[in-house]
Amino acid sequence: MQQTVRRFMSQYNQVLTRPFLVLDAYNVLDQFLFVFLDEGDDPVVCQAYYDLDHMEPGQWYKAMQPSLSTFINRVVQRVKEGGSAF
């Protein structure tokens, strides 16, 4: 998944200059979730779109969740309630 996202980023001329880890890739790989690895133990989860039509001009990613722990807790809660983890 890490290499696939980086390949798509290259094809769409998108660059992240800080170290990052991809958490999920979805919607036929037109978007992905990631965290910057230089933001400490509980980084903000960001959502990125390869195609800029989905974002504000000049911005291809944005913060989605306040933190990785919040994101994980929300997914766990959703699964406990019978929902999908994805």
Image: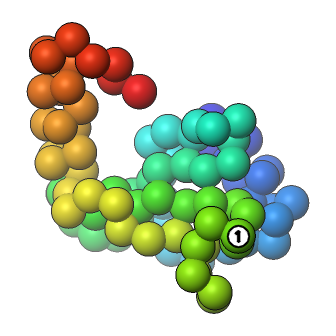
Q: Mark 1 points at which residue?
A: 53
In this picture, residue 55 sits left or right of residue 50: left
Q: In this view, does 75 lie above or below 56?
A: above
Picture residue at 63% right of the left edge, 38% below the top: 27
User: Quarter holding the C terminus?
Assistant: top left
Quadrant of the rendered image containing residue 81: top left
The front one of 82 and 70 is: 82
Picture residue at 71% right of the left edge, 53% below the top: 6
Q: What amino acid does circle 1 point to? A: Asp
Quadrant of the rendered image containing residue 14: bottom right
Residue 23: x percent and y percent? 45, 42
Q: Can residue 37 be seen in this view?
A: no
The color scheme shown is rainbow
Residue 8: x percent and y percent? 78, 52
Element type at mark 1: helix
Q: In this view, does 69 lie above or below 13?
A: above
Picture residue at 22% right of the left edge, 18% below the top: 79
Q: Is residue 38 visible?
A: yes
Residue 62: x percent and y percent? 44, 71
